[in-house]
Image (cartoon, grey):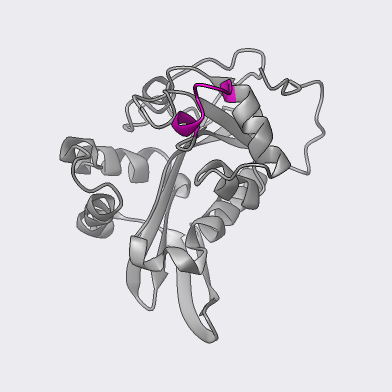
Amino acid sequence: MYHSEFFVFDQEKPVPVVIRNYTQEDFDELIQIQSECFPPPFPSELWWNKEQLSNHVLRFPEGAMCIEVEGTLAGSLTGLVVNFSPNHMEHTWEEITDHGYIKNHDPSGNTLYIVDISVRPKYRKLGLGKLMMQAMYQVVIQKKLVRLLGGGRMPGYHKVADTLTPGQYLNKVLKGDLKDPVITFLLRCGRVPIGIVENYLDDEESCHYAALMEWRNPFIKKIGGVQFDGI
């Protein structure tokens, strides 16, 4: 099981944090975090429920991460293992995560797929999301998986959808001409886009598109692969 203690800085003040695997004792607080990250009008029935959380800790406890700041639970990151081929990228979030229940978790798979990342708004200036992502990279290495992968929302896309294709928008973010709240964050975490999928989520801000963002295990040689063409 994962457990790491270190400090982050709130301006000039060192603040102790712990990244660890979440357990059943954390479920109520994890649901509370979801309510803070996804307030109304986001439907509360789409927050984590206890059956989903139970599956996370029973089926793949290594992929159930949380972070504490001075003893307070501040965020979580959840993943499962799937078999993924870059030659068959099309999928929805519901399909690949089993609607968040991860009953399709495959211990013999090649890819750690991110189900969700949530950080309480009051703690977001501390860079906790990036730290949890880096911890999950360590799981990828420890389990000798090929990659970490997930669909990145593009919430800024709707503002320019009448003039740019999703690929053109993503390329402008990559060049630094535009910033996107999610894609730019994932780039800062070391993730790289490998393609765009349609109808990933019911997400009007992203016009229902998502960028598949990968972090490859540096200890596994890349053979072939897909070159993002910015379509």
Which residue is painted at 48% across and 17% down in the image? 198
Query: Does 123 sit left or right of 174 as displayed?
Result: left
Q: Is residue 175 above or below residue 167?
A: below
Which residue is painted at 52% across and 84% down in the image? 14
Number of labels in the image equals: 0
Q: Which corner quadrant of the image does residue 140 belong to?
A: top right
Which residue is painted at 38% across and 78% down in the image? 70
Q: Which corner quadrant of the image does residue 95 belong to?
A: top left
- What's drawn in magenta, residue-wise? 157-166
Q: Is residue 146 visible?
A: no
Q: Is residue 130 above or below residue 101?
A: below
Q: Is residue 145 above or below residue 94?
A: below
Q: Where's the C terminus, which quadrant?
A: top right
Front-most of residues 80 and 34 = 34
Query: Does 86 sit left or right of 72 as displayed?
Result: right
Query: Does 127 sit left or right of 229 as displayed?
Result: left
Query: Does 51 sit left or right of 144 as displayed?
Result: left
User: Residue 124: image x %, image y %?
Assistant: 43, 63
Residue farthest along the bottom direction in this orientation = 13
Q: Which corner quadrant of the image does residue 194 belong to?
A: top right
15 magenta-colored: no
Front-most of residues 14 and 4 = 14
User: Residue 226: image x %, image y %?
Assistant: 74, 20
Which residue is painted at 66% across and 19% down in the image? 86
165 magenta-colored: yes
For the stretch drawn in magenta, the main secondary structure is loop
Q: Is residue 154 visible?
A: yes
Front-most of residues 145 and 180 = 180
